[in-house]
Image (cartoon, helix red, strand yellow):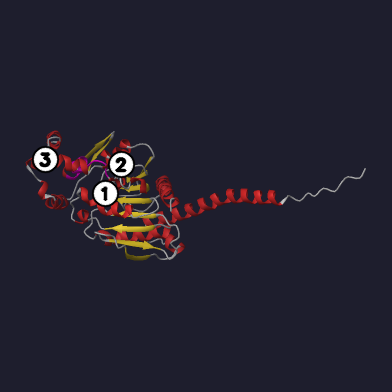
Amino acid sequence: MHQPKVDRRRPPLARLLSLLVAVFLVVPVLAFARSAVVSAAFVAEFLTDGAVTALSRLSERPRRADANLPGASADAYTLSVRDHRTPLVLVHGLSPDGKDDPRLVRAANLLARVGFEVTVPTIPGLTRWRLRPEDRQPVVTILSTRAAPAVVVGVSVGAGVALLAAAEPAVRDHVRLVLSLGGYASARQLVRFYLTGDYAYDGARGHARHDPELVRAFLTANADLLDPSAQRLLGSSDPAAFTTALDALSPGLARLLDALSPERVARDITARLVLVHGRNDIAVPYSETLRLAAARPEKTRVVLVGVVGHVEHASGALEWRQVVDLIRLWTAMYTLTASA
């Protein structure tokens, strides 16, 4: 019996659907591959302080210009193609050069090469070793002018500024991710560490020796805060006596330290938190990152590594036993670069 001829070609709609399915399967893979490569290149160039130009070879040189930020000094780093780029605010740590610190300029260029539209403000207090609550305002101003949700990266004590700004009710919904590198949680505990070298939180404890000249510079810059209650701190060499004096600060000084402590507003932050810290950090102890994560554990990721000192590559050559740390650091950078 004669069988009717069957057209075995797939109908146009079926072919179109198959193509769409293939695209939806392939595109995420390609996006992952790009972010994975860019993250690895970023880590390589960051850890070698530019000796390995992996990311620079893969991207164009960003353009640096005045950001025209009302009431503040800030620079913008952009690529020639600026379509739909995620805004990123980079907050420096203690540095007299502010936004012009050479290390910060290198970091801003790398982040722009990743694909962010980077803005770097100078935080006045951090250029003079005297952080105050109003120092968050340049970051808040930038966030308030961005149409798309932004990423905020805070370095060292500047991470406190970044986190405090991200908790501000007026702009907290403008932030999608905060990355803290070597940041702190409690201003009181930071004062304890600067004056005594001691740190402790949840099993993480130790002691670091500070350069007396740095401690003297810190005290000189904050001489206006040295009321009688603060003077008692300076005269307390015994740890127990120091703790007693720290708990008995004048109401004004206690309020200031509380206002500068990100742990107190951590739950007001709606963005994801990625907290990166060096285990051997002698400028801000890693216990502060553990303290901050405990204050807001939801949507928070802690990355403790030995390949980073404070906010730079730890001294010494990289070794194979540090490969786990490198992977951890890469995953943190992947989270960051994927948001670009």
Q: Please, what is the three-letter code of the amino acid marked with disc 2? A: Thr
Picture quadrant of residue 250: top left
Q: Which mark is residue 173?
A: none
Measuring 18% from the left and 55% from the top, which residue is drawn there? Answer: 128
Upstream in sequence: badge 1 or badge 2: 1
Dot 2 corresponds to which residue?
289
Q: Please, what is the three-letter code of the amino acid marked with disc 1? A: Val
Q: Is the residue marked by circle 1 packed among few (<14), some (14-19), or many (20+) residues within 10 Å?
A: many
Q: Is residue 184 above or below residue 221?
A: above
From the viewer's perspective, tell me whether residue 79 is left or right of residue 137.
right
From the viewer's perspective, tell me whether residue 137 is left or right of residue 53.
left
Which label sits in the foreground, 1 or 3?
Answer: 1
Q: Is the residue marked by circle 3 packed among few (<14), some (14-19), or many (20+) residues within 10 Å?
A: many
Residue that protrudes farthest toward the right in the picture? 1
Dot 1 corresponds to which residue?
161
Dot 3 corresponds to which residue?
233
- The boundaries of the magenta stretch are 184-194
